[in-house]
Amino acid sequence: MVRTIAVFNLKGGVGKTTLAVNLGAALQLMGKRVLLVDLDPQHDLTMYLGVNPAQLKGVEYFITRDLKFAEIVRSYNHRFDFLPSGKKLRDLEDLMSALYVNYKKMNFLIRDAFLHIEQQYDYIIFDCPPAGGQLTINALSYVQDVFLPVQCQFLALRGSKKALFLIYRVKTLFNPALRLGAVIPVMYDPRNRLSSVIVEKLHNAYGDYLTDTKIRINVSLAEAPGFGKTIFDYKPFSRGAQDFKKLAREVAEMPAGELRLEQSLSHLVDSSVQHVMAGLRANNA
């Protein structure tokens, strides 16, 4: 059965694309059939894999059914597949937003498109934009799991709560099966006490949703996109490669049931609200 995952955070610069690409590559090394999907109009995943978005018709043409899947899908070194984004993706999102008021099914364009091809894969991973627009809502209305990468900094920790509210909203309105699959600490520096403090706060906030794996700061992860390579092709023995192999094993072992954890998403949101309100009361005291 296919596992559908949205890599998402409302904060930019937290390593969503690095996570999507290298987690997908690590899962492929485990023998899994993987499809990556670039849903970001900034085209980061497309450019990471060495493709010029200005010279192609990308995922936007598959979503609108103007082109068939086979006409758009590309292969990374015959290992995993990916759907690049093209220059018209932003135009598509603007159109979707304009039409949503009178056409509520606009939220399910991605679901309706991918249902026809999902059984070809074990994992479909969406690299979502850092915004709550129609592309993100469409992805969340289709996938089973959201993977939330959180940079080991205080502002990123606060921003993760905003993402949680959007996930809960989509779950309530459009996709009852949606769940928070994992909160993943990224850009972790074991030499920096702040990283350990943030991970502790993440554990207090998210409990078992927090992965055991931490993606450490590693210059090779930053360099790999410049060569159009995954970390396993660029520096296969680096710390970055080690971390993503460990994360992929952890993801593969996650149960695929409807509720993976004792906590529900609604409980997490309620707890988050209580935490914010407690802080407001303390500031006003």
Image (spheres, rainbow, N blue to C red):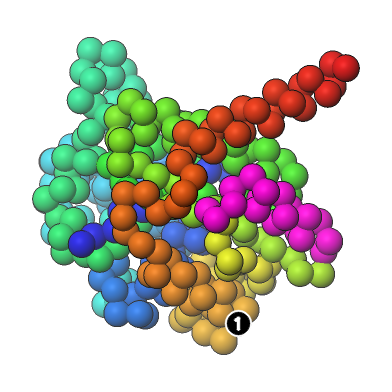
Q: Amino acid at mark 1?
A: Ser
Q: Is residue 193 part of the magenta span, yes or no?
A: yes
Q: Which residue is mark 1?
A: 238
- Can residue 263 be spotted in the picture? yes
- Can residue 85 be spotted in the picture? no
User: In the rendered image of this protein, does residue 113 appear above or below residue 211?
Assistant: above
Nearer to the camera, 83 or 20: 20
Residue 136 shown left or right of residue 69 in the figure: right
In the rendered image, which quarter contains the N terminus? bottom left
Question: In the figure, residue 248 lies in which quadrant?
Answer: bottom left
Question: In the figure, residue 167 lies in which quadrant?
Answer: top left
In the rendered image, which quarter contains the C terminus? top right
User: In the rendered image of this protein, does residue 221 appear above or below residue 95?
Assistant: below
Q: Which residues are magenta?
A: 192-209
Residue 112, image x, y percentages: 16, 40
Give the residue drawn at x 58%, y 68%.
213
User: In the rendered image of this protein, does residue 141 appear above or below residue 281?
Assistant: below
Give the residue drawn at x 69%, y 63%.
188
By secondary structure, the bulk of the magenta-drawn segment is best described as helix
Residue 180, image x, y percentages: 45, 46
Q: Is residue 243 part of the magenta span, yes or no?
A: no
Q: Among all residues in the image, which is located at the extreme right?
A: 285
Give the residue drawn at x 24%, y 40%.
110
Q: Among all residues in the image, which is located at the extreme top?
A: 102
Residue 206 shown left or right of residue 254 in the figure: right
User: In the rendered image of this protein, does residue 101 appear above or below residue 24?
Assistant: above
Residue 268, image x, y percentages: 54, 38
